[in-house]
Every structure is written in C-alpha cells, then in structure tokens.
Amino acid sequence: MAACCCGAGRLLGALPVLSSARACSQRLAYPVCKVQLGCWGVQGMELGRFVTVLVLTQRLKMGGAVSAGEDNDELIDNLKEAQYIRTELVEQAFRAIDRADYYLEEFKDNAYKDLAWKHGNIHLSAPCIYSEVMEALDLQPGLSFLNLGSGTGYLSSMVGLILGPFGVNHGVELHSDVIEYAKQKLDFFIKTSDSFDKFEFCEPSFVTGNCLEISPDCTQYDRVYCGAGVQKEHEDYMKNLLKVGGILVMPLEEKLTKITRTGPSAWETKKILAVSFAPLIQPNHTDSGKSRLVHLPPVAVRSLQDLARIAIQGTIKKIIHQETMSKNGNGLKNPPRFKRRRVRRRRMETIVFLDKEVFASRISNPSDDNNNCEETEDERREEEEMKPSELKPDPPVNFLREKVLSLPLPDPLKYYLLYYREK
C-alpha cells in the first residue's frame, strides 16, 4: 500500500479532479471495489482514516471488470473467466442473445465492452452487473419474474429463455419511448434469431409506469429485479412484491443486494457487490394528489393451439438431440467451439477518492512484465498452430427449422410451428 501512496502523490494533478465516485460513474450501473485502509500519508498530507479505493481499467473507464470482447461469445468467455458467469443456464442465455442487437447502430462498437451505455432514456448496465444479477436470481423454468425498470428488454429476454413457456415475464418501465424500443428489439429477436428456436421462450410483457406506484392488489412474483437505486424507505415496498420463497435483487444503499423471503415476515439478506446506480425516480402525483396506479399484465392462459405447438416443437427437439447424439457417438453435449485468442491480463490502475479530491496511481505487479511476455509468446505460438478452419466458426444450422419444413404438412401449419419467423 505504501507504494500506492507514493505513486498517488507523484501523479497528483495529472488527472482532472472529480467531486466524488458517484460523479465519476456518471450515475450508471457500474461495479465499485471499495477497500478500507488505515492512516497513511502522501508527501506529508494526511489522507484520513478511511479511504475508498476505486479500481479501474488501464483506460480509466468505469465498469471495466473484464476485458472487452471482439464479439458476444468472447465477451461471455471473459465474464466466465472472471467468475461473473458461473452456471450453465446463465451462460446459455447470455450466448443466445447478442448484446449488440440492443444498441443503436452508431454505438455498436462499444457493445462488447464491460461498460454501461446510456443514450437519452435508453440504458444498458455493464455486462458484469447483468451477470451477477442473473446468477443471484437463481432462475428456474416455470417461475414468475418482475423486472422493475425493464429498459431495453435485454435482461427480460435472457430471463425468458430460462423461464420457458410456462413462466411469467413482466416488466415495468417509466418511459414510453423505451417501451417501444424494447418491443422493437423483442420482435427482432423473435423473428430473426436462431437462438429463439433452441429455447422454449417466455415472452416478456411490458407496461408503462412508475414502479413505485404498482397497484396494491397485484400478484406476487417468484423473482423480482429492480434496475435503479432503491432508497431505504422503499425496501419494504419491494419486499412485498415477493412470494414466500422468492428472491429480490436490487441496488440498496450502494450495494447490489439479494433478499430471499423465507417466510411471511422472515427475510435473508446478502450483499453481493458495491455498485453505483441512478436512484429510482419518485412518483409525480397528479394535480388531484392521487398517484397513477400501475396495473401489471394479467397472467395469460395459453390456448390449446399454442400448447400443441409447444408440445410438437418439444418432440422435434428431442428427436434432433437423439439424432445428434447417435451421429457424434462421443456423448458431447455441445460441439467444440472454435479456438479463441487467450485473454491478456491487463495492467490495473487505482483511483483514490478522498472527500473532493482524487489521487491516482498505478499499482505495479513485479510479475506483470514477465507474465505479459510469456502470454504474448504463448499467443503467438497458438496462432501459428491454428489451422485456417479454426479461425472462423462454422455457420450455424437451424435443425429445428429444417426438420419442421421437411414435415408432410401444409405450409401455413409449418410456419405456425415456426412462429412465422423469417429464415
């Protein structure tokens, strides 16, 4: 730590002064690493008893907990390596939906960086935040899910891949323009993504309104996530949205928090990680002083026709799986993925916040230089060993679509089984 202090003194003034860590985060959803340190000084200046250390990436961008990827799969590889994604269900959901599809075209270059993105009312949290949320929710098929501040629908769609056709997937969003954006992205995913055919999907339903004004007679949910900072006075309101046995994940007092309802009046609370979220917007009451109650969508009962489609698709998928297993003959669950370059360890920077001043320093690891040289040599060797066929993945084949189109059925029925999706 002493080396860090001296470095901070040397670099004092090299960076613009920020008023606080919250200002630096631009009030977006970022992870924050907080450490309490003892008294230590820089060039004779006493820094005080407790100092908050904020670890940033080399480029000093907030939220970069993992390396950027060249595509969605590489981003997920990095999240797995950093242990943000820890379960197979969550990994499959993240790989199935390309994060870039939820960006505006002119901002897609940043889609695979571990950074939050905001444009007008449209907002996406950093991938590492969504990973922690998905893992903490402990999602299972058939559960009911409520997303407060559903935004672009990116998280709701990933959740829907796990909930399956008999789950419930609702979202509340304050801004009507964001609701329209989310519906467009959902429609694009359903019509064009091959991933849609690989999962049994619980399509999300979105309503416009303030999530602090949900009608008191609404149903309770198995899983609830709030995507904005919750003030302490709203904690009980959020808890009451849960069924017994349910899980609530929300940013509470600068900590991403997991709350499990273990009984009618019993709760278990776990702090996951320090974060910085924009706070919930307080309700704007009408002139009469009455709030506008938000009525959540009713739980829909599927038609017999829809249930038949789900059953037929499920049967076809089982046949495809059995055929694939018999062809491979090796028991592999998934075909091997093409080789990727090794993720390079990056040198880290440290920002030290104290009241209204900022001190910056590079923490050097003596082994970094040697490790970087060794990893560079390993990467060069791996690339030389790669065959051209390994550099690019084979184009995906939609076996379900091929199988349905080969059935001796009228075309309208075939396209109904495929949800009228484009090729």
Image (cartoon, rainbow, N blue to C red):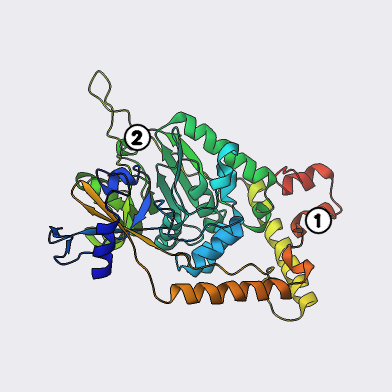
- In this rendering, the answer to whether 32 lies above or below 286 is below
Secondary structure of residue under mark 1? helix
Question: Residue 24: x, y in percent?
Answer: 32, 46
Q: Are marks 2 and 1 in contact (CB under 8 Å)?
A: no
Picture quarter containing residue 397? bottom right
Q: Which residue is mark 2?
A: 210
* Disc 1: which residue: 402
Please determine whether, in this image, residue 48 is positioned above or below residue 291.
Answer: below
Sort mark 2 into few (<14), some (14-19) or many (20+) by Cα contacts within 10 Å. many
Query: Label 2 amino acid?
Result: Asn
* Crowding at mark 1 (Cα within 10 Å: few <14, some 14-19, many 20+): few
Compute the Cα span from label 2 to label 1: 44 Å
Q: Quadrant of the N terminus?
A: bottom left
Side (left or right) of 223 relative to 43: right
Please state if 276 lies on the left or on the right of 408 as rendered.
Answer: left
Q: Is residue 410 or residue 344 the one in the foreground?
A: 344
Choose top left, top right, bottom left or bottom right for residue 133. Answer: bottom left
Ranked by sequence position, the earlier of labels 2 and 1 is 2
The residue that appears at 68% across and 54% down in the rendered structure is: 197
Label 2: element kind = loop
Task: Point out residue 89 in the picture as x, y percentages from the top left corner.
Answer: 53, 65
Q: Amino acid at mark 1?
A: Glu
Can the viewer see residue 286 in this picture?
Answer: yes
Q: Residue at x 54, y 47 (%)?
A: 110
Q: For residue 221, say whether it is visible.
A: no
Q: Position of residue 401 (x, y in %)?
A: 77, 54
Count numbered badges in the picture: 2
